[in-house]
Image: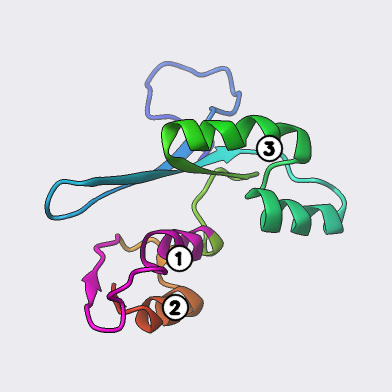
Amino acid sequence: PSTTLATKQCGGKDKERATAMLMSDLTGTRHPLFLVLRMTKSKIKTVIQETLKERQGFGKRLWSSVEPLEAKNTCVIYGNPTTWWNATISLDFLKFHFGKRSDQATKNVLLLWDDFSAHWTDEVVAYAESINVVL
């Protein structure tokens, strides 16, 4: 989105954005925050793949600052040019929170997500089914 709800005229500049995914369970336990921040994309395709695979979308220099923040604040931080949640982050979210459950073969987990398209890609739905997460 490049517009605002304000009735006052804006300067036409893009707003700073962040996307956050918060999760707690039935007992009120809060789970680590997933955060998506704006990060410019490299123009070199091999570097793009490397940053996504190894550093969650951040370049080498910036990653050295982001990684300690994640550890200190018990959160997971991603960077992408649109600052939007995407299917890759949805998969990583499922893997992080539910992929290593010791009881995943015997117990189902109900995860309530909204209707956002990145939550419902074929790959995300198939992975959720494989680890007994009911979407």
Q: Is residue 58 visible?
A: yes
Say if 128 sits above or below 27 in the image: below
The quarter of the image holding the C terminus is bottom left
Q: Nearer the viewer, residue 135 or 24?
A: 24
**Image coordinates for residue 57, horizontal then vertical, percent:** 66, 48
Identify the magenta region: 89-113
Q: Position of residue 68 (x, y in %)?
A: 57, 32
x, y (%) of residue 97?
37, 59
Q: Is residue 69 a member of the stretch shown in magenta?
A: no
Q: Quadrant of residue 67?
A: top right
Q: Are marks 2 and 3 in contact (CB under 8 Å)?
A: no
Q: Amino acid at mark 1?
A: Lys
Instruction: Name the one closer to the observer, 115 or 33.
Output: 33
- Mark-to-mark CA distance, 2 and 3: 28 Å
Res 95 label:
1
SS assignment at label 2: helix
Label pair 3/1, CB-CB below 8 angstroms? no
Sequence-wise, which precedes: disc 3 or disc 1? Answer: 3
